[in-house]
Image (cartoon, rainbow, N blue to C red):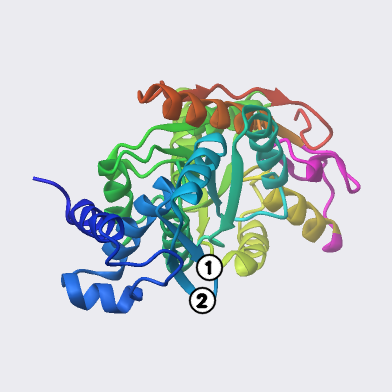
Amino acid sequence: MKPKYQEISDDIRSQIVSHHYQIGKMIPTELQLQKTYQVSRHTVREAISILVNEGYLKREKGSGTYVLKKEEHQNDASSFREQKTIGVITTYISDYIFPSIIRGIEKVLSTEGYSLLLASTNNDYLQEKECLEKMIEFGVDGLIVEPTKSNQYNPNLATYVNLREHNIPVLMINATYEEINTPFICVDDVETGFVATQELIENHHQNLLLITKIDDLQGKYRMKGFIKACENNKIKITSDSIITFTTENMSSIYEDVLEKLNDHPEITGIVCYNDKLASSLIKKLLENGKQIPEQYSIVGNDDSTLSIIGGVSLTTTVHPKENLGIDAAKWIVSTIETGVNQDNILYHPTLVKRESVKKL
């Protein structure tokens, strides 16, 4: 049995061929088609996208959807085959490591003749939903997605399953939604947390603090690596050994850390969720008269540009950034061309040693 959107596209196509819908004229609106076929707006959009891709229809922004002439059918379909589009949805676009990831994706897609449609969620479910609807409406051939709050239940999971059922390949980067077993390319974040913690332990730090983000899988897995390193080295972990934060309360985390350090002067080593957090924490500590690394040794994660600016260069684990973007673009193009999902990619982190860790 055909999916409902396919039945609708077949019916509209037959009405175009029979000239019920006239060349150059606008077909009924999405709302009218919803009422006619008794389906959701999403289903109507999927049906229309098929006919746009085949060259029977043409969307005109702010006007409507129009029937093309026969020669336009052929030209439009040919153009579509020549220029496929990959949607890329990240949590953020313009700061931190994301420009490097996007640059890597663009390098591959431009050489392969694919176009790029970019959107960001700001790590917000509603914005992620809007991004997904935008990609579906446009009719992308594949999606590269950085998950939104991947360690929490996501109300948009059904949409991802729907994309898969319609043979639109989806690749997750940096994390994945464990509930739907989506292909991914990311760093081994358990190992990342382990390597960062081990660096402090090898420099004789016994009283450690982890500061990690808890609404995504990266933070959860880095916590797991922190605990593993402590257990392997018989370092005692208490309720005071870990501070967590979420996307919404990140701005208040620094006061919590300063209070924790004042209450526990025995702490000498700190593992931070990422370089962004670590560099800001170093700045706050210096402003409060603390010395880095003389009083506190700090390890970040991502080897971003933030790790080498400021008064103290940061010891940090490496994120592949641009290479991840390149590999993600190659993965999605190969999957589209072959029709077969490629293998997951899991990078093993390395450590860059700089000035922020001192041997006791």
Q: In front: 55, or 248?
A: 55
User: Type of residue at label 2?
Assistant: Ser
- Tell me the magenta residue range: 287-314
Q: Return the residue at label 1.
A: 60
Whether residue 153 is visible, yes or no, is: no
Tell me, for residue 68, which label it has, or none. none
How far across and how far down the image is residue 106, in percent? 67, 37
Q: Tell me if mark 1 has few (under 14), some (14-19) or many (20+) residues whose alpha carbon lies within 10 angstroms of its own.
A: few
Q: Main secondary structure of the magenta part?
A: loop
Task: Quote the CA–CA distance across marks 1 and 2.
Answer: 5 Å
The residue under the point 57% across, 58% down is 120
Q: Which residue shows up at 61% across the image and 30% down it?
A: 324
Quadrant hosting residue 356: top right
Q: Quadrant of the C terminus?
A: top right
Q: Nearer the viewer, residue 322 or 40?
A: 40
Q: Residue at x 68, y 34 (%)?
A: 110
Question: Does residue 177 appear left or right of residue 299 in this picture?
Answer: left
In terms of image quadrants, where is residue 200? Answer: top right
Q: Is residue 297 magenta?
A: yes
Q: Residue 97, image x and y in percent?
A: 69, 44
Circle 2 crowding by C-alpha within 10 Å: few under 14, some 14–19, many from 20: few
Closest to the observer, 259 or 134: 134
Please state which amino acid type lies under the numbered disc 1.
Glu
User: Picture quarter containing residue 184?
Assistant: top left
Residues at badges 1 and 2 in contact (C-beta under 8 Å)? Answer: yes
Q: Is residue 226 visible?
A: yes
**339 on left or right of 244:** left
For label 2, the residue is 63
Q: With respect to residue 214, does 201 lie above or below?
A: above
